[in-house]
Amino acid sequence: MGMVTFVDETTAGSRGDGWGLEIAEERLALRELIRRRVFQEVAEYHAERPEVFQGLVQPEGAERTLNGYALRTPRRIDPEKQTELALQAFERNGFLVLVGDRQVSGLDEEMDLPLGVEVTFLKLVALVGG
């Protein structure tokens, strides 16, 4: 089991602090990696109930804020729906994914996940509605 570090960046040059997620597999398809990331974000949001959801894509019915997405009406976020929004955003070129220094081009592409690898999500456009 190894730790993968997720880092969010924007084309404007901002870079998040990053956070780690334990991944047991040494190889994984990008689709599954995105699903695990999103499920972790949603689980942390539900456990902590912060005012702002900090995730890869904007949940439906949320407003973009400086630090994430504020839900107009507090509610539970569906991790399956949120995953679908993230996968659609990737397919529409809303963000690129770099594993180490290599860009992953397709959702079904398997990638090596060596111990301590950094996975960068480079957001290309505002991900309103996914």
Image (cartoon, rainbow, N blue to C red):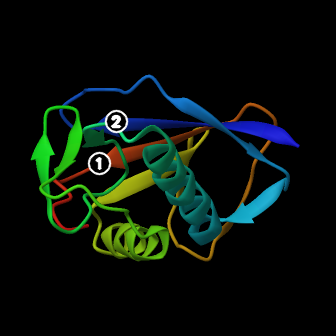
Q: Residue at (61%, 59%) from the top-left corner?
A: 36
Q: Position of residue 32 (x, y in %)?
A: 64, 68
Q: Residue at (42%, 72%) from the top-left corner?
A: 87
Query: Does the residue at mark 2 contact the one at mark 1 (Cβ under 8 Å)?
Result: yes
Q: How many labels does the image show?
A: 2
> Amino acid type of disc 2?
Glu
Labelled disc at residue 123:
1
Q: What element carries label 1?
A: strand
Q: Residues under labels 2 and 1: Cα distance?
A: 6 Å
Q: How crowded is mark 2: few (under 14 residues within 10 Å), some or many (20 or more)?
A: some
65 left or right of 9 in image: left
Q: Where is residue 73 in the image (x, y as percent from the top left)?
A: 16, 58
| Quadrant of the rendering where the C terminus is positioned | bottom left
Q: Is mark 2 on a helix, strand or loop?
A: strand
Pick whichever of labels 2 and 1 is earlier in the sequence. Answer: 2
Q: Is residue 111 above or below residue 6?
A: below
Q: Residue at (54%, 61%) from the top-left corner?
A: 34
Q: Mark 2 points at which residue?
A: 9
112 left or right of 97 in image: right
Q: In which quarter of the image is residue 8?
A: top left
14 left or right of 43 in image: left
Q: Residue at (85%, 53%) from the top-left corner?
A: 26
Q: Quadrant of residue 75?
A: bottom left
> Amino acid type of disc 1?
Lys
125 left or right of 122 in image: left
Q: In this view, does 41 lie above or below 4?
A: below
| Quadrant of the rendering where the N terminus is positioned | top right
Q: Residues within 10 Å of mark 1 (few under 14, many from 20)?
A: many
Q: Is residue 7 above or below residue 122?
A: above
